[in-house]
């Protein structure tokens, strides 16, 4: 995999994707999302990246806080990562990450789907 410099935060997303591929190669498919989340947590921790796990993102409507949603990882305060173990990434997953990006002020998100024979990766830009 090569870094695509035209993408914002491409060096960081490349690191994240490489770690996710390692997790997928080691664990394979078939586990629930929490297992992959925990494995990624260990990889991120080992890498020295600054990150928040299960970060709460406040949802504000016309100045009123409606509550929060939880994103799996916020890496370096730049990239949101959402872990999935589903048959296919769909429009609902993409819309969810776009909403997280808007609410958090981030511009780049990754959806990592571990349920496929090969790790499925979707880059989401706000």
Image: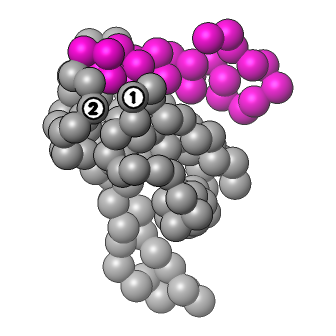
The boundaries of the magenta stretch are 1-26
Horizontal and vertical percent for residue 88? Answer: 47, 50
Instruction: Decide: few, some or many residues near mark 1? Use Cα within 10 Å; few <14, some 14-19, many ≥20.
Output: few
Judge whether 42 appears above or below 55 on screen: above
Which percent across, then down, holds residue 120? 49, 35
Residue on which the image places disc 2: 29
Question: In which quadrant of the rendered view does residue 14 lie?
Answer: top right
In the rendered structure, does residue 19 fall within the stretch colored magenta? yes
As drawn, the label of residue 86 is none
Q: Is residue 43 visible?
A: no
Confirm whether residue 90 shows in the render: yes
Local SS, label 2: loop
- Residue sitting at 44 percent across and 38 percent down? 112
Is the residue under label 2 in contact with that under label 1 (CB below 8 Å)? yes
**On the image, which quarter does residue 67 sit in?**
bottom left
Q: Residue at x 24, y 15 (%)?
A: 26
Is 95 above or below relative to 50? below
Which residue is found at the position 82% from the left and 26% from the top? 6
Pointer 1 residue: 117
Task: Determine the CA span between mark 1 and mark 2.
Answer: 7 Å
* Residue at image coords 27%, 32%: 29
Position of residue 18 measured from the top left corner of the image (x, y, whole percent)? 46, 15
Check the picture and name the quadrant holding the C terminus.
bottom right
Work out which quarter of the rendered image holds the N terminus and state it: top right
> Could you say whether the residue bearing mark 1 is in a helix, strand or loop?
loop
- Estimate how packed mark 2 is, as few (under 14), some (14 to 19) or many (20 or more) residues with alpha carbons within 10 Å: some
């Amino acid at each position: 995999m090569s870094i695509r410099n035209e993408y914002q935060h491409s060096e960081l997303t490349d690191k994240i994707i490489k770690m996710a591929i390692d997790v997928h190669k080691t664990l394979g498919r078939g586990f629930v999302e929490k297992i992959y989340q925990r494995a990624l947590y260990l990889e991120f921790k080992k890498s020295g990246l600054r990150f928040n796990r299960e970060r709460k993102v406040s949802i504000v409507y016309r100045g009123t806080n409606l509550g929060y949603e939880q994103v799996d990882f916020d890496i370096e305060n730049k990239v949101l990562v959402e872990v999935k173990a589903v048959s296919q990434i769909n429009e609902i997953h993409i819309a969810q990450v776009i909403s997280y990006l808007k609410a958090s002020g981030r511009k780049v998100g990754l959806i990592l789907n571990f349920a496929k024979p090969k790790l499925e990766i979707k880059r989401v830009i706000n």
